[in-house]
Image (spheres, rainbow, N blue to C red):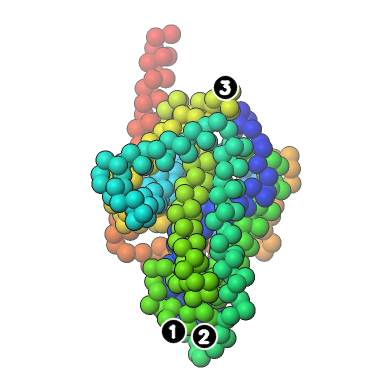
Amino acid sequence: MTNRGALRRVLGPGTLALLFANSIIGAGIFALPGLAAAALGTATAFAYAICGLLVALIFLCFAEAGSRVHESGGAYAYVQAAFGPFAGFIAANLMWFGLGACVDAALADVLVRTLATLAPVLSQPTPRALALVALFAFMAGVNIVGVTIGARLVVVLTVLKLLPLLLLIVVGLPHIDLTHVIPASLPSASTLGSGVLLLMFAFIGGESSLSASGELRAPSRTVPLGLAMGVATVLGVYFGLQLVAEGVLGAELPQQTTTPLAAAAAQLMGPWGRSLLLGAVSLSIFGTISGDLLVSPRCLHAAATDGLLPAALAKVHPRFQTPYVAILVFAAIACALAVLGAFKSLAILGTSSVLLVDVGVCLAVLRLRQRRVQTTDAPFVIPGGPLVPILGATVCVWVLTNLSREELLGLSALVFFSGGLYLRVQRARQFKAARAARSS
């Protein structure tokens, strides 16, 4: 496998856990409690338990794959090592464009719209576009200067956006009315399934944190430990927020589908609490985009290093040792998509892309075991043989079958485009090699 050792291995399990939590805990958490209550009533705890189990299955597969394959690219590297460059190339495009650029663009659009409530000038096309350019230029510059600086920025932003959420949990727990959270009856299977589907979408995004695998210290240890810490953090925060929102707002919660946490904070802490949570929305979005600018360009860099994308994308800065061309290109594409808008379409493509990537990684674990792919370090091995990877893939396929026709069409278009692009690149390489052979 291609050596990508030019990148510095400086990130530990704590940083990976925060990258993971930052990638998942975005703007959606601020609306999730109300949406979950509207779908499930007081039975949300059951859906969280099932969702936590399903998410654990998927990221156990990521943990084993990441302990066996240490190159940058995350899911791309795992799928490529298991099934070859064609499947890996499709996974790379799903990750960097679908989950990365499209979701970042959608979040940046939300961020500027939120700031426009404070500065109405940002609602005008030119100031809005300039604000988006400045946002992506700043974050690209930070990540080019060095992975350590970029990671520190993400860590700081993640901690800052978690603090208001943790404060709400701590302040709210003593004021919970248990009659609001104890379900009178179990939901039907179909209702529970719909609720789990809703929560599953809220957990996507952590996959991108492993795109910086080439810069993790001792990946065989860091990946499983960092993912375990990240999953535990996300589940704890999500469940705590749901408990407080339900226990404080009660029957009012299902009507609070836009800013339920801000409503709970206002009831517990007054107007300043509401302002704190609304401010946390902008900070949360900024932190999520910043974290993705750190990890997603590594997919471009990894694919280019393997000869599947233009060689310029594989360049590493001689001083900062970061994939600076890939960072600039990724930021430019995400910025262009954000300027164009179309939040709903961008979000749909991002959420459906990651589900297909998860299927590939779950199945890749079985193939990597069969091929005995590992480094000199002993890999993390999921107990239970093939059970967890098969269950993880099955869960992802089940969620995909619940997507709308629009989501499936968008995903299919990206997959077919990626496959066609790969074949064209391969033909160009073969033509170049044949011409070189004739000239010699």
Residue that carries the numbered disc 2 in the rendered image = 180
Q: Quadrant of residue 231?
A: bottom right
Q: Nearer the viewer, mark 3 or mark 1?
A: 1
Residue that carries the numbered disc 3 in the rendered image = 318
- Type of amino acid at the residue the image marks with label 1: Ala
**Dot 1 crowding, Cα within 10 Å, few <14, some 14–19, many 20+:** some
Q: Residue furthest bottom?
A: 184
Q: Residue furthest front?
A: 271
- Type of amino acid at the residue the image marks with label 2: His
Quadrant into which the N terminus falls: top right
Q: Are marks 2 and 3 in contact (CB under 8 Å)?
A: no
Lower position in the chain sequence, tag 3 or tag 1: 1
Q: Is residue 73 visible?
A: no
Q: Secondary structure at mark 3?
A: loop
Q: Secondary structure at mark 2?
A: helix
Lower position in the chain sequence, tag 2 or tag 3: 2
In the visual, does 124 lie left or right of 438?
Answer: left
Q: Are marks 2 and 1 in contact (CB under 8 Å)?
A: yes
**Dot 3 crowding, Cα within 10 Å, few <14, some 14–19, many 20+:** few
Q: Which mark is residue 251?
A: 1
Task: Give the distance between the C-alpha atoms of the residues marked 3 and 1, in whole angstroms.
Answer: 59 Å
Q: Nearer the viewer, mark 2 or mark 3?
A: 2
Quadrant into which the C terminus falls: top left
Task: Give the distance between the C-alpha atoms of the residues marked 2 and 3, in whole angstroms.
Answer: 59 Å
Of residue 367 and residue 262, the one placed in the foreground of this image is 262
In the visual, does 118 lie left or right of 69?
Answer: left
Q: Residue furthest top?
A: 440
Residue at the spot x=41%, y=57% of the render?
351
